[in-house]
Amino acid sequence: MSTSSPPRDGEEFVAALRGLSHRYWGTHPFHHRMHAGELSEHELRVWAANRWYYQCVLPQKDAAIISNCPVPEVRRGWLDRIVYHDGAADRDHASGRERWLRLCEAVGLDRTEVLDERHVVPGVRFAVDAYVTFARTRPWIEAVASGLTEMFSGHLMRRRVGDMLANYEWIRREDLAYFTNRIEAVAGEGKSTLDIVVRYCVTREQQDRAIDALSFKCDVLWSMLDAIERAAAKE
C-alpha cells in the first residue's frame, strides 16, 4: 500500500507556488534602493551590464526546455519566447536583447563593453549558468516551473518604469522599452506557464519538485543581485 501523500488540488498547488512571491528578487535591498532613486550611475551601470548576461542566455534556457519536452503543443508555444528575446530574422531591432542594450546605453555603457561581458562578475555568471544547466538537465516540467517567477514580475516592471522615470532624470521612457514592452507579454507567459505546470504536475512528487524548481529560480535571481550589489559597491 502506498504511503505517499495525495496530490494537492489545483487551487492548493497554485497557492503553494504563489506563496514563494516573498522570495522573488523584487524584495531584494538592491531593488528597493533602485526604486527609491538611491542608486548612483555607477551602480546602475553595474546592474545593467550584469543583468545583460541573464537576458542573453534566456533563449538558450528556453531552447533547452524545448529539446527535453516530448509534448508538441508545449514545444510550439514555447518557441515564441525564443523569438521574443532573440528577435525574428527580419526584426532583430525589435528583440528583447536589443531593448536591453538600449537601456545599457542609456545608463552610460558602450554597446561593445556590454557584448564582450567584461563587467560580468563571477557570482552572476555562476548563478546564470546554473540556471541554464538546470533547464538542460532536469525534467522538462521542472524547468518550466522554474520560470514561474513570471507570475511575480509584471507588477514589478510596471512600478520600475514609473520609479526610474521619476528618480533618474537622464533615463527616458523610450530607454525603458524592455520593461514597457514586456509587461503585457510576461503576464501572458506567466498564465501559460502556470497552466502547463498545473496540467502536467499530477502527482504530489511532481508538484513538490515544481515548487522546489521555482524556489531554486528565486535563489538564482537573489544570488545575482547579491553579486551585483557587492560589485557595485566597488567604485
Image (cartoon, grey):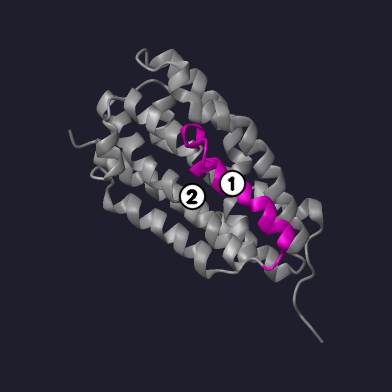
What's under tag 2, amino acid-wise?
Leu
- Residue at image position (71%, 47%) is 192
Nearer to us in this view, 57 or 168: 57
Residue 20: image location, x then y, percent: 60, 48
What's under tag 1, amino acid-wise?
Arg
- Residue at image position (52%, 29%) is 179
Q: Residues within 10 Å of mark 1 (few under 14, many from 20)?
A: some
- Quarter holding residue 104: top left
Question: Dot 1 corresponds to which residue?
Answer: 81
Nearer to us in this view, 191 or 78: 78
Q: Residues within 10 Å of mark 2 (few under 14, many from 20)?
A: some
Above/below status of 12 relative to 48: below
Look at the numbered discs 2 and 1 and tell me whether their residues touch, using CB distance below 8 Å.
yes
Residue 108: image location, x then y, percent: 28, 25
Q: Does residue 42 appear in the picture of this structure?
A: yes
Q: Does 159 appear in magenta?
A: no
Question: Dot 2 corresponds to which residue?
Answer: 58
State the predominant SS element of the stretch in magenta.
Answer: helix
Above/below status of 152 relative to 11: above
Residue 231: image location, x then y, percent: 25, 41
Residue range (magenta): 70-95
> Which is nearer the N-term, disc 2 or disc 1?
2
Q: CA distance from mark 2 to mark 1?
A: 9 Å
Check the image and name the residue furthest to the left.
235
- Residue at image position (69%, 70%) is 205
Residue 191: image location, x then y, percent: 71, 44
